[in-house]
Every structure is written in structure tokens, then in C-alpha cells.
Amino acid sequence: GRLGQLNRHAIRQQFEAHVSSALRNGTRPIIVLLGLDQFQNLDDVYGRLGCDAVLCQVAARISRGNSSKLIARIADDEFALCFEDQDLETVYRIAIGLVRSVKEPVQLGEDHHSAGANTGIVQSDGGPTSVEELLRCAHIALSRARNTKVDCCFFNREMDALVQNRSLLQKDFRTALHRDEIRSY
């Protein structure tokens, strides 16, 4: 309900403040964005209360399964984790462990359901950046992981260029359609 939304908002603000502080202090935080699969299907079948039960179980697994100082639910089906004192390989192993943990069946009443997950990982490159930019890049990596059906994907600049080029192509296509410059046969 409303209290849950306020709490999620406060936790996200705390997460963003923590990452911003790490960026200002010159550390190179690593962000892991974990996204649940088939969450909308659970919502359709069990409603908000059922999804809340799933989220509580998943959040408990995420909390137990890593050494992140801060975890935040940043979207309906996404959790963000921040690592500051870990190398990429260690964070990768943690991310894979989290995906495996989330894939274990969750209990809803007397039923058991499997909720899959994928992760996107991005590390600050030490240059000027923001929390929003890191989360955007982590989301690009998460989307790539989901689209390629892999458990984990690291962000790289080529992914961003592909996303930007696709966006420009879609914009040009819509403009051409609107101007009647394209005819389908």
C-alpha cells in the first residue's frame, strides 16, 4: 500500500545518497541490478498480496546472499545492490549466486512457484558520473541479460551506443511515417 511505497521511496533515496557519496569519495562502486522474471504473471494470478509475499521472500534471499552494504527495491520487479570493496569477479560470483537463490521456488499459500531472475552489472569508471547514469547503465545490462536469456551481463559502452542508435532509428522511422515518406507494400 501507500506505506510500502513511501518506505520503498525512502530506501531508494538512501541507496542513491550512499552511491553518490561513494562517487564523491572517489571509490568505484559496482551496481548490480537484479530483475525478476515473470513477476507480472504472479501479479495477475495472486494480486498485490501474493506479490508482496514473493518480494519479501526474494528480498530475504538477496539480503542473506551477499555482502552489499545497501540493497534497494527500485522498481516493481528490480532490486539494486551497491558494492564498494569488492572486485568485479567477486561481485559476478555474488550476482550468479543471487540469481540461483531467487530461482528456488517461493511459497504462496500452499503453492510453490519459481521466479527467475537476471542481473546487470556496471562499475563506475572513475570519471564524472551520477547514480542515475549508473542505474541506467545497469538497466541496459539487465535488459541485455534478459534478452539473451543469460543470468548476468556486464555493461559496456558498445551496449549504450547500440541503445542510442536504436532510439535514433526509431525516431527517424516515426518521423518518416508521420510525413508519409514511407509506404508499405
Image (cartoon, rainbow, N blue to C red):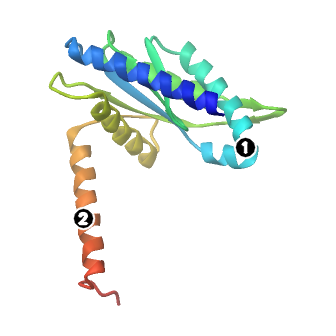
Q: Is residue 31 left or right of residue 55?
A: left
Residue 143 spot, x, y in % from top left:
40, 44
Q: Secondary structure at mark 1?
A: helix
Residue 8 spot, x, y in % from top left:
53, 27
**Residue 7 occupies quadrant:** top right
The mark that comes first in sequence, 2 or 1, is 1
**Residue 104 occupies quadrant:** top right
**Residue 6 occupies quadrant:** top right
Amino acid type, callout 1 = Gly
Q: At 30% across and 37% down in the image, what residue appears?
A: 137
User: Circle 1 sits on which residue?
Assistant: 47
Amino acid type, callout 2 = Leu
Q: Is residue 7 left or right of residue 124?
A: right
Residue 75 spot, x, y in % from top left:
50, 36
Above or below — where is 154 with respect to 59?
below
Above or below — where is 32 with respect to 27?
below
Q: At 59% across and 23% down in the image, what residue appears?
A: 59
Nearer the camera: disc 2 or disc 1 = 1
Q: At 21% across and 28% down in the image, what residue appears?
A: 129
Marks counted in the figure total 2
Q: Quadrant of the N terminus?
A: top right
Q: Quadrant of the C terminus?
A: bottom left
Furthest-bottom residue in this view? 185
Q: Is residue 55 visible?
A: yes
Residue 147 spot, x, y in % from top left:
43, 49
Q: Is residue 7 left or right of residue 111?
A: left
User: Circle 2 sits on which residue?
Assistant: 169
